[in-house]
Amino acid sequence: MTTAPITIEPMQAKYNLQVGRLLVHGFRGKFQNLTNMNDDDLALFFEKLFEHFPTEPASQRMVALQDGEVIGTISIKWKPESDIKQKLPSWKNFNRLGKWNLLKMLIGLSLLDHKPQAGECYIAEIVVHPDHRSKGVGKLLLQWAQHFMQTEPHLDMLSLHVVGSNPRAKHLYELLSFQTHLQKNSLVRHLLFNESKWEYMVLKLR
């Protein structure tokens, strides 16, 4: 049986539900520690966020597809040319989740947010479906990010954060020449996400 090829394509609205469920696989541990939301509610939160929260202008999300199924995703962003204030999505779109859960999720996302510096292309998320790990999907997504950066003359550095409890991901990044630039210990992140050690890794291409 021939394995279907994997393609990397721009995010589209029709993938919102699949990507939402994929993010639950990637970040379930962090956000279930923060809220009492189950997998379905977490997936709904991410899906609604895609639907009702405008995409940042200086950002790009891609999906890895195989046989029409989303098996991975990567989100990158860079410093915008001008500061644009984004409006929060309307509460009514998230009614089912409860105001307290919504508030905690938005606070959690803001604490995980990273503001890229000039020339920096930051990988905000990279997630591969558990059934497709160790098959080169993450490497393909990272190679796409490297290629994207090389085509943008104003970008010269690729960066990301990895938690101390994920040595497997760190090893992949090191194989692709990322180097630890800074190690962080955060009490707030430990209390909210049960993750205290974070490493900021950098790949300079120019």
Image: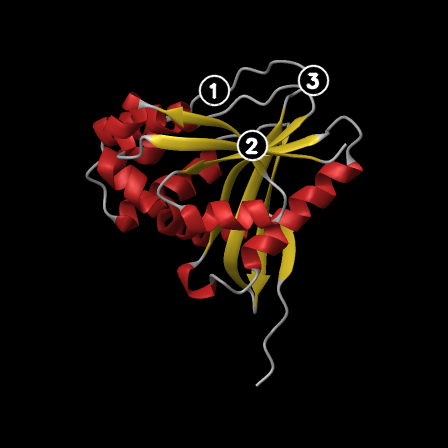
| Residue 138, quarter of picture | bottom right
Which disc is residue 81 wearing?
A: 3
Q: Name the residue under label 2.
A: 55
Tag nearer the camera, 3 or 2: 3
Please tell me which residue is depicted at 60% across the width and 40% down the height of the picture: 178
Question: Which secondary structure lies at badge 1?
Answer: loop
Q: Are marks 1 and 3 in contact (CB under 8 Å)?
A: no
Numbered mark located on residue 87 in the image: 1
CA–CA distance between discs 1 and 3?
A: 18 Å
Q: Distance between the residues labelled 1 and 2?
A: 11 Å
Q: Which residue is drawn at 43% across and 36% down?
A: 49
Task: Inspect the image, locate mark 1, and give the three-letter code of the amino acid beneath it.
Answer: Lys
Residue 145 sits above or below residue 130 on the image = above
Comes first in the chain, label 1 or label 3: 3
Q: Which of marks 1 and 3 is in front?
A: 3
- Estimate the x, y position of residue 20 in percent, counting from the top left: 42, 47
Badge 2 element: loop
Q: In this view, does 28 lie to the left or right of 68?
A: left
Residue 184 vertical position relative to residue 69 in the rendered view, above or below: above
Q: Which of 103 and 51 is in front in this view?
A: 103
Relative image position of residue 153 (x, y in whole percent): 80, 30
Q: Earlier in the sequence, mark 3 or mark 2?
A: 2
